[in-house]
Image (tube, rainbow, N blue to C red):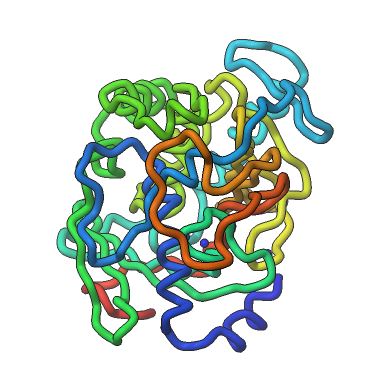
């Protein structure tokens, strides 16, 4: 899961039921990466993804105020803008001082990630709460095969990561923008779109953008891989630049954005040093919830049915700290 970090850290409660909700919100974003069934085991109790993928009813226009939507091969001013952002972010990744990404880690180590996240408004509704924040601490094994999170009862739950594209896969030569994009697209093509993705009209380009978003948000990536991914983003048809994007900690930056038929997604970087800040996703049109005519809906608690409004945030995170540690549960 934008600079008021100290304020958030000082007011954030210890991990409780609310923090578990925050974890679910983050893991929903992670689940966007194409993954085969079955889904994760029940340890994290991930809600059904139907509601995330069934949001909104009408297509967004191809051009929005503040966004220059481009094709990856379009040599327009808009494409030049997103290409320039990709190059600046890539150079920042290559020279960045972050210890988590600039030294070669030893096998068996883990990447600690601390985030501020907007928790779900009312599970299983898809919106997150614009006015609340929780701190989420997650550990990712550097081989990409495991992740760990507090289970809400003071115990560390370690989960196997479902098969899918990982940072270790991307680190295999050649590590170039074209190679990154080819691997991402191959991963998307190898995993048929779920009924939910089909129902929301998600294109291969949008799925590729979400896959890179997932990788940026949590997977351990070498500086070379992260730089290549930034340079690959402008090659995805429809990626744009969003000025004055804001992460969940109130930090202002600039974003790579993708506007699909039903949702706009952003990968936010700092406007000055171009380091990764966080993720944001927004609903584009009013949509009844549950979505009538869609997949069978779970029984909803009282007060959770209604309309998901246009402009409702669906994902909102801010990456506050990353560090390589020797074992899960260790904090810097």
Residue 139 on image: x %, y %: 31, 67
Residue 325 on image: x %, y %: 29, 72
* Residue in view at x 55 percent, y 62 percent: 304
Viewer-proximal residue, 327 or 311? Answer: 311
Q: Is residue 118 visible?
A: no
* Residue in view at x 64 percent, y 46 percent: 282
Q: Residue furthest right?
A: 65
Residue 6 on image: x %, y %: 64, 82
> Looking at the rendering, in which quadrant would you find the C terminus?
bottom left
* Residue in view at x 53 percent, y 30 percent: 233
Q: Is residue 170 above or below residue 271?
A: above
Q: Is residue 201 above or below residue 223?
A: above
Viewer-proximal residue, 162 or 183? Answer: 162
Q: Is residue 75 visible?
A: yes
Q: How many marks?
A: 0
Q: Is residue 86 above or below residue 92?
A: above
Residue 94 on image: x %, y %: 48, 45
Left or right, 290 with reference to 138: right
Left or right, 13 with reference to 153: right
* Residue in view at x 74 percent, y 23 percent: 61
């Amino acid at each position: 899961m934008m600079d008021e970090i100290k304020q958030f850290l000082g007011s954030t409660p210890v991990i409780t039921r609310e923090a578990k909700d925050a974890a679910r919100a983050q893991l929903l974003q992670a689940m966007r990466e194409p993954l085969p069934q079955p889904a994760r085991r029940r340890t994290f109790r991930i809600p059904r993804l139907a509601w995330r993928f069934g949001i909104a009813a009408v297509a967004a226009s191809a051009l929005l105020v503040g966004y220059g939507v481009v094709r990856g091969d379009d040599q327009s001013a808009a494409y030049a803008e997103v290409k320039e952002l990709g190059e600046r972010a890539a150079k920042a990744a290559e020279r960045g001082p972050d210890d988590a990404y600039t030294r070669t880690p030893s096998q068996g180590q883990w990447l600690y990630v601390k985030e501020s996240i907007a928790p779900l408004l009312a599970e299983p509704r898809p919106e997150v709460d614009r006015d609340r924040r929780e701190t989420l601490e997650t550990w990712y094994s550097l081989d990409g095969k495991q992740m760990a999170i507090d289970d809400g009862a003071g115990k560390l739950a370690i989960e196997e990561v479902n098969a899918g594209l990982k940072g270790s896969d991307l680190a295999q030569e050649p590590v170039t923008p074209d190679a990154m994009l080819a691997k991402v697209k191959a991963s998307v093509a190898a995993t048929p779109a779920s009924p939910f993705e089909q129902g929301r009209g998600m294109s291969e380009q949008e799925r590729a953008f979400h896959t890179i978003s997932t990788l940026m948000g949590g997977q351990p990536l070498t500086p070379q891989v992260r730089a290549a991914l930034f340079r690959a983003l402008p090659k995805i048809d429809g990626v744009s630049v969003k000025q004055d994007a804001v992460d969940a900690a109130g930090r202002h930056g600039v974003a790579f954005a993708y506007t699909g038929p039903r949702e706009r997604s952003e990968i936010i970087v700092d406007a000055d040093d171009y380091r990764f800040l966080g993720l944001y996703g927004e609903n584009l049109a009013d949509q009844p919830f549950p979505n009538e005519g869609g997949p069978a809906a779970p029984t909803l608690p009282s007060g959770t049915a209604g309309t998901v409004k246009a402009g409702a945030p669906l994902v909102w995170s801010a990456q506050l700290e990353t560090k390589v540690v020797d074992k899960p549960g260790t904090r810097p």
